Image (spheres, rainbow, N blue to C red):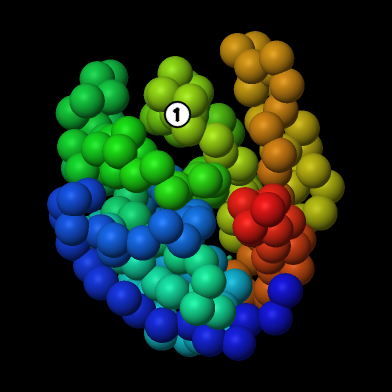
Amino acid sequence: MKIKSAEFVVSNSEVSKCPDSKLPEYAFIGRSNVGKSSLINMLTERKNLAKTSGRPGKTQLINHFLINQSWHLVDLPGYGYARVSKSAKKTFQKFITAYFEKREQMICAFVLIDSRHKPQPIDLEFMQWLGEHQVPFCIIFTKADKMKPKALERNINDYQAEMLQTWTEMPQYFISSSSNGMGRDEILDYIDSINEQFAQ
Ligand code: GTP
Ligand code: MG
């Protein structure tokens, strides 16, 4: 899919104030600093569309971007920044959970996982929460440029093994790098295929 236009629409912390639109939307979620905003810039080939930072906690609001005048990308704040808590309620800011519970046009969430790390309870808990709330999601393993190919493969295999402890199948997943564009075509083609189904 070619990105012909990408523009910022609005930021807010209330789901009820998100754009009043029926366009399909895709949300990027994951731990702080995992690379959500960078990935949005990589996918849209716009350097500063979404604000990024080396310090966790940069994105604080729900940010809507309109792509090709026909769908939305949503940049969300990271979870697990303040303190890793056992209680999902405390750790996932209320408006993030409200967003996923209420936003009907959100047709696929991309859960970003840092490809360098072992499976973390907070990510597994969050995906569990999505499953319980029947929110469709995929996984994107980020920062692949920071790994040697063998180690990357091993981490992803380990992740799949961990997921299969609780899920009957591994969700659709992608491997990305915002530094070198890895995964861009696959993720955009996937979004395109869902958009086409949605349009029918
Ligand atoms: P919050 O908004 O704080 O939740 O973080 P975020 O998930 O939006 O992360 P952000 O995109 O701001 O990136 C965090 C840091 O990781 C920045 O310093 C980025 O330059 C770096 N980064 C993001 N993606 C990649 C990647 O694919 N490769 C490398 N090498 N660095 C990356
Ligand atoms: Mg961000």
Q: Amino acid at mark 1?
A: Leu
**Count of marks placed on residues:** 1
Quadrant of image for the N terminus: bottom right
Q: Residue 86: x and y, percent? A: 28, 19
Q: Nearer the viewer, residue 82 or 71?
A: 71
Quadrant in which ligand 1 is drawn: bottom left
Residue drawn at (70%, 58%) of the image: 196
User: Could you tell me which residue is drawn at 60 percent across and 87 percent down?
Assistant: 4
The residue sitting at 53% across, 86% down in the picture is 5
Give the class, few, some or many, for how many residues have Cα within 10 Å of label 1's Cα (few <14, many ≥20): some
Residue labelled 1 has its Cβ within 8 Å of some atom of ligand 1: no
Query: Quadrant location of residue 76?
Result: bottom left
Task: Judge left or right: residue 109 versus residue 13.
Answer: right
Q: Please give the residue where the numbered disc 1 appears in the rendered image.
A: 130
x then y, percent, for residue 74: 40, 60
Horizontal side of 37 relative to 62 (left or right) equals right
Q: Is residue 5 above or below residue 172?
A: below
Query: Residue 53, position in %: x, y?
Result: 34, 71
Residue 166: give x, y in percent of width and height: 60, 12
- Which residue ends up furthest to the right in the rendered image? 150
User: Do we see residue 46 in this rendering?
Assistant: yes
Q: Nearer the viewer, residue 84 or 74?
A: 74
Q: Nearer the viewer, residue 152 or 65?
A: 65
Q: Can see residue 147?
A: no
Mark 1 falls on what kind of element?
Answer: helix
- Residue 138: quadrant of the picture: top right
